[in-house]
Amino acid sequence: MQTIFDFMSADHDRLDGLFKEFQKASHSGPAEAKKLFSEFSFGLKRHIVWEEEILFPLFEERTGMKDGGPTEAMRFEHLQIKSFLKEIDGRISLVQDSTGAEQELLRILGDHNMKEEHILYPSIDESLGEKEIKAVLEKITKTRRSHL
């Protein structure tokens, strides 16, 4: 059985790979870098939607932790992440160096993903039965086809 941890962690890995491809491409040509960054940005924003619309409410319901809990901190980090995505996208469009923003984005994502993979996803998996996990993953799968 696939767990929420398995699915979401695999998406973290996929996104990390896309970002590394973008960074390599940024040295060879702006068109390819723009394409890869757009794919990465779309995927990361979709990942955030899955968390904020599906997983965070589920975690909050199951644990009773809402205000001041880990999801509140993660929502704030999502705002920071989106801000860096916008900044990097703007710099790419203007063919400007985005290294500083990239490093800050990676710093935030590293800490953020660790919290999700060590707290959020395992807690949700532990609080749900096999049928419930399957239903959540189906909901995520349906959401992954929609546009942001």
Image (tube, grey):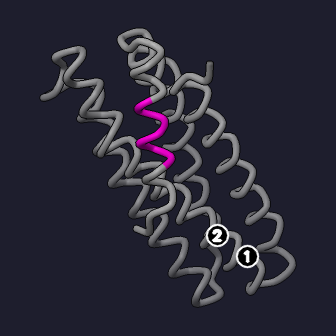
According to the picture, the residue beneath numbered tag 1 turns out to be 33
Q: Residue furthest left?
A: 67
Label 2 belongs to which residue? 37
The secondary element bearing badge 1 is classed as helix
- Please tell me whether mark 2 sits on a helix, a strand or a loop: helix
User: CB atoms at circles 1 and 2 under 8 Å apart?
Assistant: yes
Residue 120 is covered by the magenta coloring: no
Q: Which quadrant would residue 27 be assigned to in this image?
A: bottom right
Decide if residue 147 is on the left or right side of residue 3: left
Between 32 and 142, the residue placed more toward the observer is: 142
Whole-percent x and y of residue 93?
58, 87
Q: Quadrant of the C terminus?
A: bottom left
Report the span colored magenta.
135-141
The residue located at (58%, 90%) in the rendering is 94
Name the magenta segment's main secondary structure. Answer: helix
User: 120 or 112: nearer the eye?
Assistant: 120
Q: What residue type is labelled 2?
A: Phe
The outermost residue toward the right is: 28
Q: Is residue 17 left or right of residue 122?
A: right
**Height in image: 37 above or below 75?**
below
From this viewpoint, is residue 75 visible? yes
> Quadrant of residue 83 in the image?
bottom left
Q: What residue type is labelled 1?
A: Ala
How far from the left and from the top, in percent, is residue 84?
46, 62
